[in-house]
Amino acid sequence: ILNVEQSPQSLHVQEGDSTNFTCSFPSSNFYALHWYRWETAKSPEALFVMTLNGDEKKKGRISATLNTKEGYSYLYIKGSQPEDSATYLCALETGTASKLTFGTGTRLQVTL
Amino acid sequence: DAGVIQSPRHEVTEMGQEVTLRCKPISGHDYLFWYRQTMMRGLELLIYFNNNVPIDDSGMPEDRFSAKMPNASFSTLKIQPSEPRDSAVYFCASTNYAQAFFGQGTRLTVV
């Protein structure tokens, strides 16, 4: 059973704060690491897919890095806004079946 | 494309009843996944299909759960008989190999 862990479980920051959270995974059988953003009552929405050690992806104020050798990925949000409030999920893809094993997510709440 | 479509969005049923959840994947996607989301365990993979064939059903919790994919554009997840502990949000997702696209989920409540 693959163990994909995310920390912290929840996070409460104020508007304008920058924040980051962690996804850790077993480095063997690695194929890709996915980050999803999941707003309440909506479906998870893909943010990034990363495959190479040292990968760094950016989308607006959100960026992510990947270390496949030590088995972790960081997601950063610069200057958090209330609309960033959501649960951020990482998922490990192994093999070629696009089968994703999800972490339990980090729930981010940004207040004014 | 309208994305992955699930129905119903909400289902409330009595314990012991049969429940059928439906999913229409994005056209052209070869893989379809069924996930269950609970507070305790997060998103769990139940079963996935490749070209309509079930590949891995090791996540299906019990024999009460079954899934079919009769064609490339339709899949069902059936629970018979349903129990209160089956209450959760069930997601269907399909993939184009680059990323998974999720439906909006079916919130199931078994009373």
Image: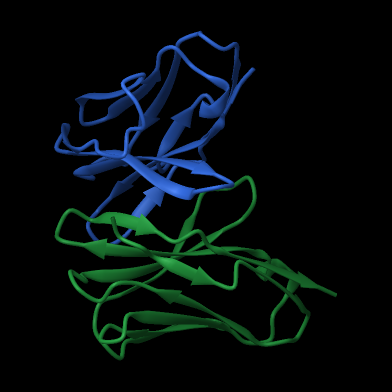
Q: Colour of chain B?
A: blue
The location of residue A77, given as percent across then percent down, is 59, 82
Q: Residue at x 66, y 87 (%)?
A: A18
Relative to residue A87, is residue B99 drawn left or right? left
Q: Residue at x 35, y 84 (%)?
A: A66
Which one is in front, A90 or B70? Answer: A90
In this view, which residue lies farthest toward the bottom? Answer: A54
- Chain green in the figure, letter: A
- For the C terminus of chain B, give its image quadrant: top right
The location of residue A25, given as percent across then percent down, is 34, 72
Relative to residue A68, is residue A64 drawn left or right? right
The location of residue B49, given as percent across then percent down, is 21, 38
Vertical comparison of B2 with A53: above or below? above
Q: Residue at x 60, y 11 (%)?
A: B14
Vertical comparison of A48 with B53: above or below? below
Which one is in front, B29 or A107? Answer: A107
Picture quadrant of residue B70: top left
Vertical comparison of A68 with B104: above or below? below
In this view, which residue lies farthest toward the right? Answer: A112
The location of residue B7, given as percent across then percent down, is 48, 26
Q: Residue at x 34, y 54 (%)?
A: B100
Vertical comparison of B31 with A47: above or below? above
**Count of number-bearing discs:** 0
- For the N terminus of chain B, give its image quadrant: top left
Which one is in front, A58 or A68? Answer: A68
Colour option used: by chain
Picture quadrant of residue B54: top left
